[in-house]
Each structure stands twice: as C-alpha cells, then as structure tokens.
C-alpha cells in the first residue's frame, strides 16, 4: 500500500508560533550588541558558581511567535542553556558577514524566505549585468552614473564592503572596462560572496539551534494530527513535526534542504536563474548535490500500479509558499500520474490568494484552472491552533 505525503515549509513552523522568519534572525542581528553584553555578564556570573544545570525557561515572544528584544533578554538570562562556542562563532559572523551587512543596510523587511532568496538572486543578477552589459555604458562617465539607482546601490555596496572589489569611482576608460570584463574581478567577487554565503548559512544554523530550538511549541494543528502513516517531506531545517506530533504517524522523513543535526543546510537561488555556470554554487540544485541531501522522496511517488492494493497517493501541503526556487521538487508531485489529490492548507484569504498566484506562476493558468476545477487540487483553510502543554523535550 502506498503512503500519502505531507509536505511542509516554513509556514508550518510559523503556525506553531516559532520565530523562524528571516526577520526574526534580523532581530538578533540588530540587537546583538545588547544581547551579547548581557549574555557575557551572565556567563561570568555562572562561571563563579560550581555547576549550573540546564533548565527549561519561558521566552517572551511577540504576536504570532515573533522574536522580540524581551525574548533575547530571556535567552541571555539563561546563558547556561546556550552553547558558548556556537555563540562566539555567531558573534564573529554577525560582525563581519557581507550578506548580513547587506540585508541590514538595505532595510530588508520581508518575512518570506522566498523573498529573502529572491533578494540574493537580485544581487547576483545585478553583478552579472554589471560585468556583461552595464559596464559598457559607463565608458567616458563616472562608474555608477549610467546605472539605475537600485543597481548602483548594490554595486556601490560591493565596492565598499568587498576588499578585492575596491574599484575607483571615477571616469571609466575603455581599458578599465577591458580589465573588468576580461580580468579576475568577477571571479574574485563571487568567491567572496560564496564564502560569505557559507557564513550566513552557518549563522542561521546557530540561530535555529540556540534560539528557535530552545522554544517549546505549545500548539497543535487539528488537521495535521488527523494524518496517519504519511511520508514527511520537509523543506525546513528544524524538527518541529517530530517534537510536537512524534514519530507515530510518520513512515519516512526527508529533509530535502538539509537539517540542523547534519549541518547540510541548503539555501540559494532558483535552479534556472542563470544561463552560465559562474553562479552554480548559489543554486539550490548544486547545493543539494554538494551536501548530499538526496532525492529519495521520489520513491514515494508511484510510477506504476503493480497490484490492486497500490492506490494512488494523496499529497497534503502546509506552510510552503510554492515558490519557484522549489519548483523542480514540487513538480514531481503536481505532475505525478498517480497523485490523485493535492490538498493545500492556507492561513487566511490573503495567503490563499498568494498561493494561487504562486501556483499559476509555477505551472501556468491552464493547469491550475483544470486541476482546481476537477478538484484534484483543493485549498482548505487551517483550523485555529489548539493550545497544549508539551511535556517531552524537542528531538534533535
């Protein structure tokens, strides 16, 4: 008998009131100095005591589980629960990382991880355009003068913050252009940004491990509890499902974008974002190969019916925004011949409309009209979370 599939994204963690938005991470970055001082002071106090046992503690999260300055104080006041070596490393990354500095200085404010990855893609596209097209319009002019303001700001940021890309903002000659186009400037810049992306991913891993995973989810989803004997395809790095619902309803579990435990987190841009291989390291498919996150979820999708007991599977999706960066994985289910029904859960009317738009963007309007009309794809609003007391520790 085939097992149905549950696909979850970051919205699954958000439903369970966990601060897993990129903007939650930015709260840490923007309040780091205050947190770090308080944390270090508490560590010094604890070091004078014989032995401090780890203890559970509550965290003052904001509305919908948003991270707050008060929550950071709660974490700092329970310094013994945090790994000092991890926080030392996070401190170093926050102070130096180019990508973090870019997102802070650009005033990035979107909650969506898709928008966050799209912002990285925008920066890389701007760099590619600069070296292949825009630089030629600069001949005889000031370096950034002919560029649109949004592109000029990104290139200026790179000039200012990447030492190997310290160009002189002056009148550009033909020789200057040739040196940029045929020299090593782009390669060196992309190498820096590649290494800095590794640092950013490591910072996310530490944030998730030391902050998010120290918070016990206190709600359950009625619809998810009703799903029995399913295969879980998770786009998240966390272990929220297992920590709340346990293993009893799960047959197999695949974290296709890596996990905190394995330290193989995948974060990048669309697989088809670039036509050349200069940006391959930033693309998700390459990172999935490099980090060996695999594709054994494909074995869950029936290709043929061997017996009358092999029924087509049903797919349930909760908390995934259906973004283009994950199209190559999702299309396996949406185009699957033996996927009889796809249920997409949504939070509210706005979320429902955004999911429809994303689905049309991914698979085309005719496909979506046909599939929703036949009720193969259906949208169901999520019930309100049920507040519960979680007794067991989170599973890592």
Image (spheres, helix red, strand yellow):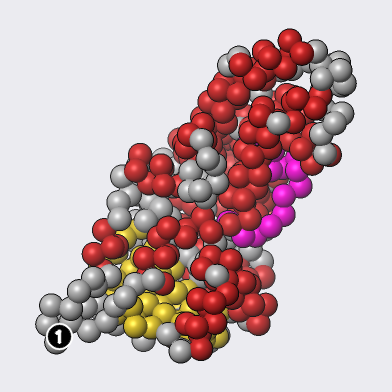
Is 175 situated above or below 261? above
Q: Which residues are magenta?
A: 99-113
Is 130 situated above or below 123? above
Quarter of the picture containing the N terminus is bottom left
- Report whether residue 203 is seen: no
Q: Is residue 223 left or right of 143 when viewed as pictured?
A: left
Q: Is residue 1 left or right of 237 when viewed as pictured?
A: left
Is 139 situated above or below 54? above
Q: Position of residue 145 (x, y in %)?
A: 87, 28
Q: Position of residue 246 (x, y in %)?
A: 31, 72
Tell me how many marks there are: 1
- Report whether residue 6 is seen: yes
SS label for mark 1: loop
The residue positioned 60% from the left and 23% from the top of the image is 186
The residue positioned 38% from the left and 83% from the top of the image is 341
The residue positioned 34% from the left and 72% from the top of the image is 336
- Nearer to us in this view, 1 or 100: 1
Q: Position of residue 60 (x, y in %)?
A: 62, 64
Outermost residue toward the top?
Answer: 175
Q: Is residue 137 left or right of 262 when viewed as pictured?
A: right
Outermost residue toward the left?
Answer: 307
- Nearer to us in this view, 45 or 197: 197
Disc 1 crowd, CA 10 A, few/some/many (<14, 14-19, 20+): few
Quarter of the picture containing the C terminus is bottom left
Q: Position of residue 373 (x, y in %)?
A: 51, 89
Is 170 situated above or below 382? above
- Nearer to us in this view, 227 or 165: 165
Q: Which residue is mark 1?
A: 309
Tell whether position 324 is magenta: no
The residue positioned 67% from the left and 51% from the top of the image is 27
Tell whether position 103 is magenta: yes
Q: Quadrant of residue 173?
A: top right
């Amino acid at each position: 008998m085939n097992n149905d599939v549950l696909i979850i994204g970051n919205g699954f963690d958000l439903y369970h009131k966990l601060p897993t938005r990129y903007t939650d991470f930015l709260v840490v970055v923007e309040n780091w100095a205050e947190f770090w001082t308080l944390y270090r002071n508490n560590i010094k106090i604890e070091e004078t005591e014989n032995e401090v046992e780890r203890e559970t503690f509550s965290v003052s999260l904001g509305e919908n589980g948003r991270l707050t300055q008060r929550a950071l104080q709660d974490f700092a006041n329970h310094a013994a629960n945090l790994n000092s070596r991890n926080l030392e490393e996070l401190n170093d990354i926050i102070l130096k990382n180019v990508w973090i500095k870019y997102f802070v200085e650009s005033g990035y404010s979107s909650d969506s991880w898709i928008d966050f990855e799209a912002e990285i893609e925008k920066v890389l596209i701007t760099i590619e355009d600069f070296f292949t097209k825009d630089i030629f319009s600069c001949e005889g002019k000031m370096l950034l003068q002919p560029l649109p303001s949004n592109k000029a700001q990104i290139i200026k940021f790179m000039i200012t913050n990447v030492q190997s890309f310290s160009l002189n903002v002056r009148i550009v000659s033909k020789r200057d252009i040739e040196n940029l186009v045929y020299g090593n400037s782009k390669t060196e810049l992309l190498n820096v940004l590649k290494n800095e992306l590794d640092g950013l991913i490591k910072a996310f891993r530490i944030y998730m491990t030391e902050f998010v995973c120290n918070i016990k989810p206190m709600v359950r989803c009625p619809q998810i509890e009703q799903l029995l004997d399913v295969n879980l395809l998770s786009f998240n790095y966390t272990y929220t499902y297992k920590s709340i619902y346990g293993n009893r309803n799960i047959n197999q579990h695949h974290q296709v974008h890596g996990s905190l435990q394995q330290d193989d987190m995948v974060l990048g841009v669309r697989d088809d974002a670039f036509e050349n291989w200069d940006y391959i390291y930033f693309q998700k498919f390459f990172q999935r190969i490099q980090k060996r996150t695999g594709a054994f979820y494909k074995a869950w999708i029936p290709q043929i019916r061997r017996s009358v007991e092999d029924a087509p599977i049903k797919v349930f999706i909760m908390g995934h925004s259906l973004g283009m960066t994950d199209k190559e994985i999702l299309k396996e289910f949406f185009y699957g011949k033996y996927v009889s029904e796809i249920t997409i859960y949504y939070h509210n009317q706005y979320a429902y409309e955004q999911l429809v738009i994303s689905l049309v963007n991914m698979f085309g309007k005719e496909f979506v009209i046909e599939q929703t009309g036949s009720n193969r794809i259906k949208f169901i609003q999520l019930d309100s979370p049920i507040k519960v007391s979680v007794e067991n520790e989170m599973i890592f």
